[in-house]
Every structure is written in C-alpha cells, then in structure tokens.
Image (tube, rainbow, N blue to C red):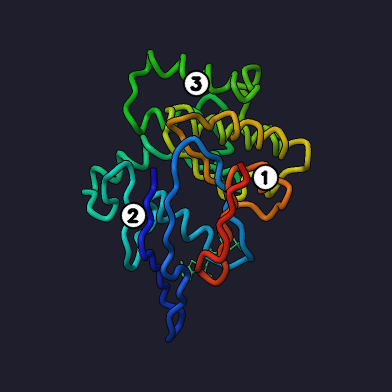
Amino acid sequence: MYLIENLNKDFKDGDGVCCALRNVNLSISTGKMVAIVGKSGSGKSTLFNILGAIDRPTSGKITVEDKNLAAFSEEELCRYRSETVGFVFQSFHIIESYTVYDNIELPLIISKVPKAKRDEMIKQAAKRVGLSDKLKTRCNRLSGGEKQRTAIARAFVHSPKIILADEPCGNLDSRNSESVMELLRGFVSRDTLVMMITHSKADAALCDRIITLSDGTVVSDEALR
Ligand SMILES: Nc1ncnc2c1ncn2[C@@H]1O[C@H](COP(=O)(O)OP(=O)(O)OP(=O)(O)O)[C@@H](O)[C@H]1O
Ligand SMILES: [Mg+2]
C-alpha cells in the first residue's frame, strides 16, 4: 500500500531547523494493523500528516497504490484525502453542535455521494459502531467513547482503504479503548490497512506490527503476527 523511501521532514524552528523525520524507509502492506510508537516528539504525527497528505515532506518519496504521492495534482490530493484515507484523532475532531448522523455524513458530502445513497451508508456505519439509537443526538451530549465511535464511523463510512488513527484511545478509559481497538481491528481486511499511533504497550501488542520512531528515525520494526 505504502512504500516510503528516504523520507525527511524539517520544520523551521526559530533560527534553526527541527528535523522531525530523518531518512525514514518503510514498506507497509494492506491486511495489517500497524502500531506506530515512540516518545513524545519522535515524529509520529508528522509521519501521519504526510501519509494522509495533510502535509508535504521536505524530501523523499511516498508511493501509494503504485503512484507517487508527491506528484499528485491538487485534484488528486483532494480525492486521495476524501476517498482513500480516513482519519481518527485523540481529540475526536467531530463537530460538537452537529448530530451523530450529520458528522458521519460529512465525508460523503465531500466525496459527492448522492443523498439517497448516503442515508443507507450512514445507518450502516452507525450500526457497526453501536450508535444506531443515537443518530439524531447532538455530539455535545455524547460520552467520550461515543464521540470516538462517531469519529470512527465517519472515518470508515466511505470505505477508505487506509485508516490513520492518531492516539485514538488517548482520551478513553480501558473499556472504551477496548471497543475502539476492536472496531479498528474489524476494519482490517485483505485490501485495507489500519495504522495507529499509540502510547499504550497493551494496544500496540494487539497490532500485527510495531514500528518504533525515535528522534525522527525508525529504530525498530517488529512483526508480531
Ligand atoms: N508545525 C510544526 N512546526 C514546527 N515544529 C513542528 C511542527 N510540527 C511538529 N514539529 C516538531 O517536530 C517534532 C515531531 O513532532 P510530532 O508532532 O510528529 O511528534 P509526536 O511523535 O507525534 O509526539 P506526541 O507523542 O507528543 O504527539 C517535534 O520536535 C515537534 O516540535
Ligand atoms: Mg503526535
């Protein structure tokens, strides 16, 4: 799915430069749940932002489905962000004043799915995360676990190939974390990939592969299953 070659990302930092990623090389295939671990500031979110085409690398090459991400036109990037990847964040990033239904609908509007088709897709996604009875509830009335399940339904409602989850369990208690891990695991199939940033050893151990970053470089890459 992803072939990452000699990836570097520098940020201007006052008068100096912060090398957030240095010479990262990885090959990541579908059918897997991959954990990205490492201390705070090691470059995990920077890597995700680049893989999700939210940010551009300073140098290096990322091939996704045999195409060079750096060579994508603006239109191709938009399509990639709205159709190929789904994001889940620690702080949920849902619109609190919208209902569960309206939040899940957002990516479908962006990728111009016709209204008649959207309704069924939203209901299916809500069912999958156990929120069928909350579709009309405003998100500011939901618990943390329910907000994250709304965010997960929104991330996979349009059947993306890749889910990028940046500390999805970071704000959740152990019971809610377990349900989020199960939902993410359930998304993995032969043609899909889940990448998850975590600070939890227990959650990383539930993944198929653990990639450790330190100071912007890959220091360990372990296949668990
Ligand atoms: N927009 C930015 N401008 C300047 N420096 C940045 C920017 N984004 C990240 N950095 C720097 O890049 C490095 C890597 O940051 P990143 O957010 O990727 O870390 P992280 O591994 O996700 O950490 P955490 O576990 O705390 O989320 C840090 O030193 C950070 O200060
Ligand atoms: Mg981070």
Q: Which mark is drawn over residue 62?
A: 2
Cα–Cα span, label 2 and label 1: 27 Å
Q: Which residue is mark 1?
A: 169
x then y, percent, for residue 207: 62, 43
Q: Nearer the viewer, residue 217 or 18?
A: 217
- Where is residue 44 shown, x and y percent of the image? 53, 59
Residue at screen point 42% across, 34% down? 161
Q: Give the quadrant of the C terminus.
A: top right
Question: Which-is-in-front pick, marks 3 and 2?
Answer: 2
The residue lying at 70 percent from left, 39 percent from top is 144
64 or 27: nearer the eye?
27
Name which of mark 3 and mark 2 comes first in the sequence: 2
| Residue at the outermost right position | 174
| Local secondary structure at mark 2 | strand
Which residue is denoted by mark 3 in the rendering?
122
Percent of width and height locating residue 36:
57, 54
Looking at the image, tell me whether mark 2 or mark 1 is earlier in sequence order. 2
Q: Residue at x 59, y 35 (%)?
A: 184
Identity of the amino acid at label 1?
Answer: Cys
Q: Nearer the viewer, mark 2 or mark 1?
A: 2
Say which of 164 and 190 sits in front: 190
Q: Secondary structure beneath disc 3?
A: helix
Up the image or down, 65 lies above or below 167; here it is: above
In this rendering, the answer to whether 97 lies above or below 112 is: below
